[in-house]
């Protein structure tokens, strides 16, 4: 199992520091010259409940979680709610789950290190038999006892990382550097002592296995970021200076990042009582002349339906983030799913229009966050960025230069006072803010306080000056004009030098895979594997959900014999959108669906493709579903 990559999994209980420990381990691997990619799995509890983080490290860029993993560090769940033995408690032996529930994906020949100060492998059914059958190398260590010797049990995480480093042939220097960056005084000294003692204890023993850390080197400075960082940094660089929100997983990551950084730019962040107030405050800030945003996840975004319609009717620029999670209702709030697409596209009242982007990578989160603000403020329309729990939380290494871009504070289609004086006004003196005849649908706005820029902003249908009006001719003129914005936006996006859609693979491939959002990198890795196996496959990652990129998707579908559409929901919502926009391709598209709370692995996409495209009617496993093309 030596080679170009290592996949390490740390498992424990929520509240035991699993996330922070995995981040430090990931940073150390990145600083050692490796490319890294993480996958988080955690329950919706503050403390207790099985959680793990998977870290994939390689000497080449990685786009996805892998298929299974090589090395398990099982720390147990010190906050387990049920200390009783398995079978006597409703949820079983929760303390042992970090070991018991992580065996199915461990690869043959893998390594297991578990904390025998908290875990007893003999309590796990068939453990010894599985170890022998899979040639696993098991190393029980009293990590808890070592930490207690130095006063703090939580430092068993440090001992576990040291044990990992010793077993995979990695020095402790990167970990000590991280500790020096984050700690000081007695805490620093004690953690370094635990690190060194655990490393020496393991290094002195004759452990034999084939798992080693790869070696690599970066050409330029790397940073460790996730999709939430990408959205937040893009918003800041595009001049956003106001955010309002209410915490809800996984939207909270974007909100927290913005809240931490906005004061550095003279901006304001407000946590309010609910999501209705959050969106309404953002609308008010935008109306007053500030680039503003808000957002939420499924249930909270549902509350934003009314202010979303208000922003559309008053033509107030607004950027919202919808960070999807498994629903409906509370559903599985810490698990990824792409089940909110139709909700995002169509929520609100009447024939409401909005722009929706669904980035597929961290870099696209940054780029499309910036583009969302440009479009929203140039065309005076609500723009929504759709991400999910996977993309929002998975950390990936990437060049720091990706974020080294010029800021853009421009407010878009706003008139200067000189331009206002020359613009059309009603005889009452009010500015004709909502003119009937702009070709692209955009009637330039004014900012409160500008001389000669007075108008009314009403949620009712209105005249050019903003007065309530129900005249049929005015209604048709205003609806037609607002709708023309989407045509103009599509022309704008199509005319750019670079597309927001991401093609991958050989241009002349016979078969295609369509994907949207967070599964893009996984599909691209599957495409590489399929082509290496002799298949002829390419993919297209689609980011523009509304207005839909008909031209690009048409060209893709026309160029292939069949296309598999990959998404994380049961109702094939993106495929449905594509058939709505491009109905004649219904017979070309089949679906590969997953909705069990876990993202796809590349092997599942490969197997799904082979079954559906190359023949066969058995799904790859019980967790993945294939839906045939229309008419089949």
Image (spheres, rainbow, N blue to C red):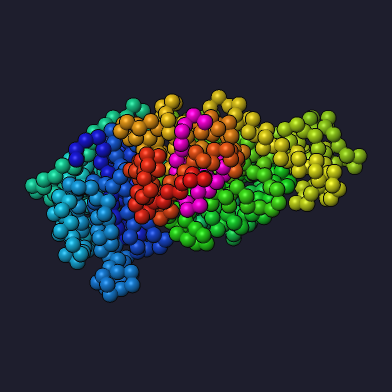
Q: Nearer the viewer, residue 229 or 618?
A: 618
- Please count the marks in the image: 0
Residue 413 is at least partly visible in this image = yes
Q: Is residue 189 above or below residue 145?
A: above
Image-based side of 387 in relation to 242, left or right: left
Q: Position of residue 448 (x, y in %)?
A: 75, 43
The residue located at (62%, 54%) in the rendering is 304
In the rendered structure, does residue 566 fall within the stretch colored magenta? yes
Direction bottom: furthest residue: 88
Residue 322 is at least partly visible in this image = no
Q: Position of residue 388 (x, y in %)?
A: 47, 48
Direction front: furthest residue: 632
Q: Nearer the viewer, residue 176 or 500?
A: 500
Image-based side of 62 in relation to 329, left or right: left
Q: Position of residue 221 (x, y in %)?
A: 37, 31
Which quadrant of the structure image shows residue 382?
top right
Which quadrant of the structure image shows residue 442?
top right
Q: Quadrant of the N terminus?
A: top left
The residue located at (80%, 34%) in the rendering is 437
Which quadrant of the structure image shows residue 414?
top right
The residue located at (79%, 30%) in the rendering is 419
Q: Nearer the viewer, residue 192 or 601?
A: 601
Direction right: furthest residue: 427
Q: Nearer the viewer, residue 158 or 250?
A: 250
Q: Which residues are magenta?
A: 558-579
The residue located at (14%, 45%) in the rendering is 209
Image-based side of 175 in relation to 249, left or right: left
Q: Position of residue 520 (x, y in %)?
A: 43, 39
In the rendered structure, does residue 313 fall within the stretch colored magenta? no
């Amino acid at each position: 199992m030596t080679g170009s990559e290592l996949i390490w999994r740390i498992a424990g209980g929520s509240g035991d520091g699993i996330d922070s420990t995995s981040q430090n381990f990931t940073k150390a691997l990145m600083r050692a010259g490796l490319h890294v990619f993480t996958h988080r799995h955690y329950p919706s509890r503050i403390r207790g409940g099985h959680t793990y983080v998977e870290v994939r490290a390689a000497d080449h860029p990685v786009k996805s979680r892998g298929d299974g993993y090589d090395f398990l560090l099982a720390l147990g769940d010190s906050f387990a709610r049920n200390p009783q033995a398995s079978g006597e408690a409703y949820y079983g032996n929760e303390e042992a789950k970090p070991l018991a529930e992580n065996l199915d994906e461990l690869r043959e020949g893998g390594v297991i290190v578990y904390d025998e100060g908290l875990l007893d492998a003999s309590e796990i059914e068939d453990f010894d038999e599985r170890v022998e059958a899979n040639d696993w190398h098991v190393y029980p260590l009293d990590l808890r006892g070592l930490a207690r010797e130095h006063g703090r049990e939580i430092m068993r995480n440090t001992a576990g990382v040291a044990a990992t480093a010793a077993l995979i042939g990695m020095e402790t220097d990167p970990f000590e550097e991280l500790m020096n960056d984050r700690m000081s005084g007695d805490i620093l000294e004690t953690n370094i002592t635990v690190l060194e003692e655990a490393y020496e204890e393991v290094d002195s023993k004759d452990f034999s296995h084939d798992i080693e850390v790869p070696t690599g080197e970066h050409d330029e400075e790397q940073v460790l970021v996730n999709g939430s960082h990408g959205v937040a940094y893009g918003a800041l660089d595009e001049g956003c200076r106001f955010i309002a929100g209410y915490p809800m997983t996984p939207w909270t990551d974007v909100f927290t990042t913005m809240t931490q950084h906005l004061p550095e730019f003279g901006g304001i962040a407000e946590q309010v009582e609910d999501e209705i107030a959050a969106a309404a405050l953002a609308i008010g800030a935008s109306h007053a002349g500030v680039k503003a945003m808000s957002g939420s996840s499924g249930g909270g975004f549902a509350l934003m339906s009314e202010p979303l319609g208000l922003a559309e009717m008053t033509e107030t620029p607004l950027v919202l983030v919808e960070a999807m999670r498994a629903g409906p209702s509370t559903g599985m709030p810490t698990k990824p799913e792409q089940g909110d697409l139709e909700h995002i596209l169509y929520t609100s009242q009447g024939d409401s229009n909005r722009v929706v982007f669904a980035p597929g990578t961290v870099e696209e989160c940054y780029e499309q966050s910036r583009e969302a603000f440009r479009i929203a403020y140039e065309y005076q329309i609500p723009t929504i960025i759709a991400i999910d729990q996977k993309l929002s939380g998975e950390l990936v290494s990437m060049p720091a230069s990706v974020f080294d871009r010029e800021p853009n504070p421009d407010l878009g289609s706003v008139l200067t006072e000189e331009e206002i004086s020359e613009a059309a006004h009603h005889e009452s003196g009010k500015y004709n803010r909502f003119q009937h005849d702009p070709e692209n649908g955009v009637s330039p706005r004014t900012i409160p306080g500008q001389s000669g820029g007075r108008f009314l902003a009403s949620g009712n249908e209105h005249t050019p000056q903003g007065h309530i009006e129900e005249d049929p001719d005015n209604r048709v003129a205003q609806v037609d004009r607002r709708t023309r914005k989407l045509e103009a936006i599509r022309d704008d996006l199509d005319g750019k030098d670079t597309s927001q859609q991401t093609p991958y693979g050989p241009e002349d491939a016979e078969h295609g895979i369509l994907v949207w959002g967070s599964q893009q990198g996984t599909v691209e890795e599957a495409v590489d594997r399929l082509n290496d196996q002799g298949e002829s496959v390419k993919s297209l990652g689609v980011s523009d959900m509304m207005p839909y990129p008909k031209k690009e998707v048409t060209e893709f579908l026309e160029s292939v014999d069949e296309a598999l559409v990959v998404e994380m929901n049961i109702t094939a919502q993106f495929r449905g959108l594509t058939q709505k926009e491009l109905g004649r391709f219904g017979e070309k598209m089949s679906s590969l669906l997953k909705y069990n709370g876990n993202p796809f692995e590349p092997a599942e996409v490969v197997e799904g493709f082979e079954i559906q495209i190359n023949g066969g009617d058995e799904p790859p496993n019980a967790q993945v579903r294939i839906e045939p093309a229309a008419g089949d």
